[in-house]
Image (spheres, grey):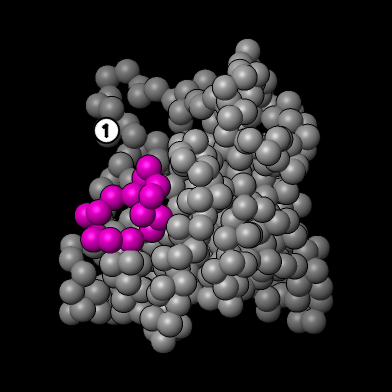
Amino acid sequence: MAMAGAVTAFGLKPDKRLRLGLDNFAVRALGWKAVELIDYAAKLKCDSLFITDLYAFKNFNAPYLKGVKRHADEKGIKLLVGSWSICPTSTRFKDEWGTADDHLQLGIRIAKTLGSPAFRVILGSRADRLTEGGIDARIADTVKVLKRNEARAKDAGIKVAVENHAGDLHSLELVRLIEEAGRDWVGANMDSGNAVWTLEDPLENLKNLAPYAITTSLRDTMMWPSENGFKGQWTAMGDGLVDWKKYFNHFMKVCPNTTVCLEPISGFVFEIKTKQKDYWKNWPGGKPKGYEKFVAFAKRGKPKPAWKAPAGVARKEAQQAFQREDLERSVAFCRKLFLSNQCSVISVQ
């Protein structure tokens, strides 16, 4: 370990540490509930667990949730929590938790009970960019829901983290949403993988969102040119194109108190069809800021075949093993990256 008072390669003193955790969506094939996820996070010697799906809870009753928190406390795991769309006009909105307001209020209550400082939500997906009024109308609708629940969230001491999700919001559009709702209590769940859906280099996405980042869901990305534009695949940390040393250098300078939660969603190939005329209906105002840097990023990669289950292994069993392996390699990658700099900037139990 570096001597006390020394400054690391990342500009931080050795006593400055980031929390390292996992997003439960990374191991979704296992179908684990909250207690099992807590035990897994502890096994990996993480200190945080981001439960981004309410299905991980058996119920939302206070005694059960307090039991989950007590188990997490005993294991030394800090909990973060989230759910899905709170935009009532989004193509992704579901009413299984009631209205958008009901959903947000439920999340605030769950977050408070679990000791999570924030509740993560989304607007929707790239399909919302083609709805009536476009993404601007969906941003306005989301802001209205947030503003109606501002007092409730502040009274509970809970911030709301809105994710750049599935191509719905460019980072600068998310910044606008946050500013309109109130950046003192609304921020970003910064997703490095989703950045490419909005034609952003993940590093440029970081530069825009880091000042607003409350929570994160991070993974690597491989991109390459295709006949219709670009193809890509999300990967475990270190298997893609992102320069993580540069990424975390900026991260630690701008949002060092934000937890690093890993969410590799690997194995499938997606395509962004920028060469097709219809694609640009998603961007009626023209190519988004930073598009040239995205193109340069995407051209640096090489094709990566989609994952296939090994012969003779049941697909579900193979998926479970694949997801665990990618997540565990990602955790190991981060530890090696930071500990190689002779400092404990990411906490390791």
Q: Determine the main secondary structure of the stretch shown in magenta.
A: loop
In the rendered image, the residue lying farthest to the bottom is 155
Q: Quadrant of residue 102?
A: bottom left
For the residue labelled by badge 1, is the local secondary structure a helix, a strand or a loop? helix
- Residue at the disc numbered 1: 316
- Disc 1 crowd rating (10 Å Cα; few below 14, some 14-19, many 20+) is few
Image quadrant assignment for residue 74: bottom left
In-image side of 250 versus 219 (left or right): right
The front one of 102 and 32 is 102
Above or below, 142 against 225 in this view is below
Depth order, front residue of 331/198 = 198
Q: How many marks?
A: 1
- Is residue 37 found inside the magenta-colored segment of the image? no
Residue 194 versus residue 156 in the image, above or below: above
Q: Does residue 33 show up? A: no
Residue stretch in magenta: 86-100
Query: Going 62% across and 47% down the picture, which residue do you hit?
Result: 170
At a point 23% along the width and 61% down the height, the residue shown is 98
In the rendered image, residue 159, in percent from the top left (x then y), is placed at 48, 74
Amino acid type at circle 1 is Lys
Q: What x and y, as percent, mark residue 161?
A: 50, 65
Q: Is residue 98 magenta?
A: yes
